[in-house]
Image: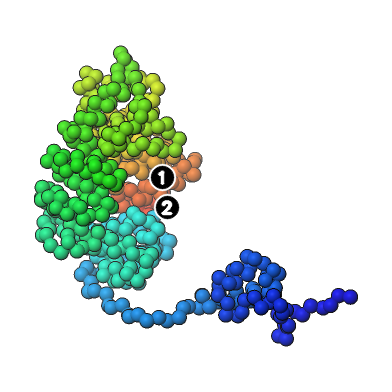
Amino acid sequence: MNTPTADPAAPNAVVPTGEAASAPAEDASWEELVSAALVGADRRSVPAVRLLEDAAVQVTRARAGRRPHAGRLPGPAAEETRPLASRAAGDRLARMLGGEQARLVPEWLETAATAGVRVPAHLIPGLLDLGARDRSIRPHLGPLAGARGRWLAELNPAWAYVLEEAVLPRAEGETPEAGETWEFGTRGDRRAYFAALRAAAPLRARELLEEGWAKETPEDRAAFVGLLGDGLSMEDEPFLEAALDDRRREVRQAAADLLTRLPESRLAGRMTERAARFLTRNGGKLVAEPPKACDSTMERDGVRPGPPAGMAKRGWWLQQVLARTPLSFWPAHFGLSPEEVIGLKIGDWAREVWMGWTRAVILQRDAAWARVLFEAEPLTDLLSVLPPEEQSARAALLVAREPMDGKMIMTLGGVARPWGTHLARAVLKTIVETSGMRPWDAGELIRLAGERLDPALHAHVERLGVTELAATLRFRHDMLKELS
């Protein structure tokens, strides 16, 4: 005959004795409950229902709060120094953070930061949450969130990134004075200070960096080296050459990138010597023979030994050497114009050679080579080297002769805002022609055009019947007017 078992959940239930002495008590720690659950309620002689009930109690306690502990209340936030954005601008930002035209939030932030205003206090937490997910907007949040934003960031580790951003960008053309900002400022303020000093007095900025170089963190050393690009000259070459011996790869890479822009630098000479061996001409053909190893001297000059996934090591090394070889070397070496050089047939490693030249154009900011390569293969990265108006003009020609697809959208995404007249006309023509027949193709183009076209065109676009695009442009038009 089976003996009935008492319900452990009942008020008068009897808990088994013996091994039950090891059962978790109601005040058992979470670790003890987890241990009992992992070993098994039966093996611990713990009623399963009681184990679950005790776990529920612990979870409720944890969610309810924690015991108070000794501490001190934070002091008040510092006084604000920037004026508040207009009420209309703040209300619009609140709607955007709520989902209306959310893609335009970065433009609002950029415009507001330039206008020298700050956001309403009740919007700061939402913006700081957004910045925690989107690094691209962080440089604007330092000044826009103001003193209260920094105060909040000190209380929430997830928002601590704001403390590293510049707070008070200097007016254009203002020459900073050495003092507390450089010695005690935040990382962002020190970088903003250094950038302003470099623009005003390049030699003094480099000397200031050299004086405290050993005390800087690796991250700051890399950032400051990158800022030397403004006003770069051969006077900076000895310092940058020495930076190639830094123990951190980021610093070495930043120094090598700048030395690549100096055709007379020692690094450029070493890369030229390597490139002459790795890429030779045989009649109307270029023959690539990539390096067989990446030695320590190549690594010092910025060649990274480990290739990206799917790329052969030798091709990766070849690409990097070509990227750091002065583009002026090739016409002189082969006795050909840039157009003739890229017109030569390439056998093996052709893709790596082209990628090396493309990277060289970007590193060296060579507009002449950018035009030549773009005509042969219209890559977005090449457009970034050209002046904004020329970017639009070349992209307009591309839109007129090429089909609108994902690759074209990507290319247009690299053209600076606002798009020029010729590109605007070409894109609007394409939108009108494709909206009815291929609305799925026109959709992404409409969204991109809404961000890049001059918002003053909203009335013209409305007359064309492209209502979605017209609405976005009108929204931007009103947004910028509120921030002006």
| Amino acid type, residue under disc 2 in the picture | Glu
The residue drawn where x is 30% and y is 19% is 280
Image side of residue 6 versus residue 29, left or right: right
Image side of residue 339 versus residue 306, left or right: left
- Residue linked to disc 2: 468
Please state the total of marks drawn on the protein image: 2
Mark 1 to mark 2: distance in Å? Answer: 11 Å
The type of colouring in the image is: rainbow
Q: In which quarter of the image is residue 480?
A: bottom left
The residue drawn where x is 51% and y is 75% is 63
Dot 1: element:
helix
Farthest front residue? 18
Q: In which quarter of the image is residue 115?
A: bottom left
Image side of residue 47 versus residue 310, left or right: right
Mark 1 and mark 2 residues within 8 Å of each other at the beta carbon: no
* Label 1: how many Cα within 10 Å (few below 14, some 14–19, many 20+): many
Q: For the N terminus, give its image quadrant.
A: bottom right
Q: Where is residue 240 in the image (x, y as percent from the top left)?
A: 19, 42
- Residue linked to disc 1: 445
Q: Which residue is at the front of the view, 404 or 291?
A: 291
Vertical position of residue 172 compared to residue 388: above or below: below
